[in-house]
Amino acid sequence: MSWDKRNKKKKWFDVFDEFDDKFDELVDEMFKYFDSAEIDLSHKKKVGPYVYGFSISVGPDGKPEIREFGNVRRTESGRIMSDVREPLIEVMDRGKEVVVIAEVPGVKMEDIHLDIKKNEIHLFVDSGELKYEKVVPVPPSVNTRSAKMEYNNGILEIRLMKK
């Protein structure tokens, strides 16, 4: 590192040079390790893809709501991976109707199945390769017989009129 002889302090940009050098060394070591490792994966079965995500929004009560989605679940005993994904779901009250939006990419409309009961929608999608499943609570004020569904570019929209 170079020093400013007048102030005997490091120049601020010299710190970044040192970091850059250390980072390059770390990356080189990592690639040396991977190159030297001989791992035979031919006997392993295909797993995945595994998807995990979350969304954060502010609920009607002003408190943050965290919703997880994907096919990885956290439990007290560890993580559980599944073949069935939980889609990202958003339920919105739009005055005279409730709109449920679900992200279910990679499937066709005919693969989507809905079972709408009193206070919930059971969404199940099976395209052969991709499976999604989620039970979505809806307010008791909706008329479940009024449900209309649209699907476009991986986004499922369900509209329910209020009673």
Image: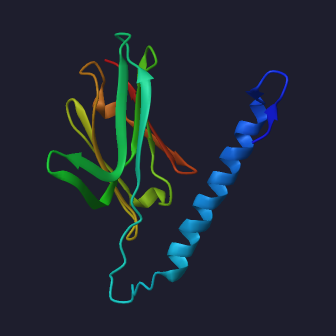
Residue pictured at 24% horizontal, 34% vertical = 120
- Name the side, left or right, on which 108 lies relative to 25: left
Question: In the depicted view, which residue is nearer to us: 67 or 17?
Answer: 17
Task: Identify whether 50 is placed above or below 143.
Answer: below
Q: Quadrant of residue 48?
A: bottom left
Q: Whole-percent x and y of residue 69? A: 37, 44
Taking the view exactly as shown, the residue that stands out farthest to the top is 61
Residue pictured at 35% horizontal, 19% vertical = 162
| Coloring basis for residues | rainbow
Task: Identify whether 31 is placed above or below 108.
Answer: below
Quarter occupied by the N terminus: top right
Task: Identify whether 158 is placed above or below 50.
Answer: above
Q: Quadrant of residue 6?
A: top right
Question: In the depicted view, which residue is nearer to us: 80 or 109?
Answer: 80
Question: In the depicted view, which residue is nearer to us: 155 or 56?
Answer: 56
Taking the view exactly as shown, the residue that stands out farthest to the right is 6
Q: Whole-percent x and y of residue 21? A: 69, 53
Residue 100 seen in this snapshot: no
